[in-house]
Image: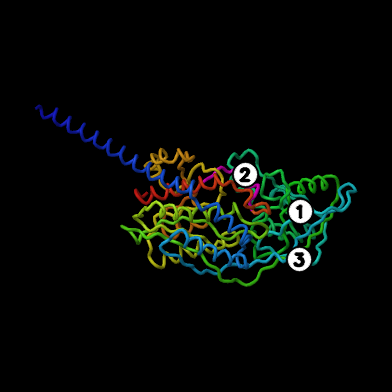
Amino acid sequence: MDPKLLKGNLLLFFLVAIGFSAAAQTAEDSILIRRLADTILTDGRAYGNLKLLTKNVGARLSGSAGYYKAEKWGQMVLTEAAADAVWMQECMVPHWVRGGKDEATFAGGGGAASAGLDVLALGNSQGTDGKVVKAPIVLIHNFDELERRKDELKGKIVFYNYPFNPLFVETFQAYGDAVRYRGGGASRASKYGAVGVLVRSMSSTVGNEPHTGALNYSDSFPKIPVFAVGLRDADKLAAAIEKGGVTGTMKSNAHMLPDTAAHNVIGELKGTEFPNEYITVGGHLDSWDPAEGAQDDGAGCVQSIEVLRALKAIGYKPRHTIRAVLFANEENGGRGGRKYAEAAKEKGEKHIIGLESDNGGFTPRGFTLSLSDEKLAAIQPWLKLLRPYGVYELVKGGGGSDVNPMGRQLGAAVGELRPDSQRYFEYHHARNDVLENVNKRELEMGAVNMAALIYLIDKYGL
């Protein structure tokens, strides 16, 4: 045979063999992912576990009795998920206390009678020690206006009325744009002598639920009380101020106590080939105090536990050690995520990826991953396996706040589940973040895709 023809035939045979091998591999992966989906969708524990967390434990702010009850819940459900080991990792956390009902009123605005406002003190804020703060309210639309009118603010209550930008299709972009007024608005107003702050809630809902969340005081200026205001009441207050002078009152018992001990709750499946290399999946166990923390972030916790349970249920033997972590103190300090990364660094652990679910239990759409363009391109074929379950994109981006320290301190890749975002900020940090607003099927589909991605990373790496 002609040597050139022989060489050509051998190359053709080699390429065909590779094609058959790849097809067989894809079929094998598809079958295993289908088994993961079957156990989650027919025999899943995610929704039942979330019901126990929300209805038997409820609110679980760091340092509260509810949080310690949640730790015990986490140990129990990870053990029931047949994790090979379950333990708690201690960290010190802030201990902020609301101290009772927050109250605010306004009067004036063209002769309007006094009216109450639906408000919640922001997390980590200093209240009024139960006394009533009374002062004229100044309407401020943005920080540029604050600077222009700084000479008017002494002795006043500043009302930041900055709405979500409806032109952002991805609502987390609207949140990122507006949240600066919640996070830093108090100290910027206090710098010019303001005695209190009201902030339009971080939401685009048509409801009137106030949405709390953490603020950050500057040590350079007095710590003044800060309330989030429900959106309908925010509109009502803004309209009254436009008509004429308005005086408001604020009353709160919110205060900080000394830091206290809490724990990350960790369960793991031991790797068979690389037991000292780790894949982490997790959500944060703490929640704000007004509600049950069902979407934020009970959903992420139960999805992460379901990843371990489903892998164990189908008899999968992971190559690497896979951990599910229920992180402490994401909401008002981020101590749990930092502690997990610090402890891993001290032990010299090698971490491949930290994957988080902290965007609600809604219909899954994709994942963000902190990979190079080349590595991200290399795993795009995985979408063929994920698309049947609703995920259509693997895009460049960071992880959630609890896993990002793993990227900074350990050099691990980080990422997060990205569900459909349109409804998340109806419930985020608000009283209506309850089990009844979680769809069982959507929650389970998120767990299916997380389990599938963790399997693919375990098998093929990044």
Which percent across, then down, holds residue 89? 48, 68
Q: Is residue 146 left or right of residue 362?
A: right
* Range of magenta residues: 417-428
Q: Nearer the viewer, residue 327 or 143?
A: 327
Q: Nearer the viewer, residue 10 or 246?
A: 10
> Residue 261 appears in which quarter of the rendering?
bottom right
Q: Give, as a three-letter code, the residue at label 1.
A: Asp
Mark closer to the observer (3, 1): 1
Secondary structure beneath label 3? loop
Residue indicated by mark 2: 423
Q: Give, as a three-letter code, the residue at label 2.
A: Arg
Instruction: Tell me which label, 2 or 1, sits earlier in the chain.
Output: 1
Which percent across, then down, holds residue 61? 62, 63
Q: Residue at x 88, y 49 (%)?
A: 112
Distance from Cα at disc 2 to Cα at disc 1 = 21 Å
Q: Is residue 324 left or right of residue 59?
A: left
Distance from Cα at disc 3 to Cα at disc 2 = 34 Å
The answer, for residue 227, to whether it is visible in the render is yes
Residue indicated by mark 3: 128
Which percent across, then down, holds residue 372? 40, 46
The answer, for residue 222, to whether it is visible in the render is no
**Residue at the farthest left position:** 1
Instruction: Tell me which label, 3 or 2, sits earlier in the chain.
Output: 3
Distance from Cα at disc 3 to Cα at disc 1 = 17 Å
- The dot on residue 118 is 1
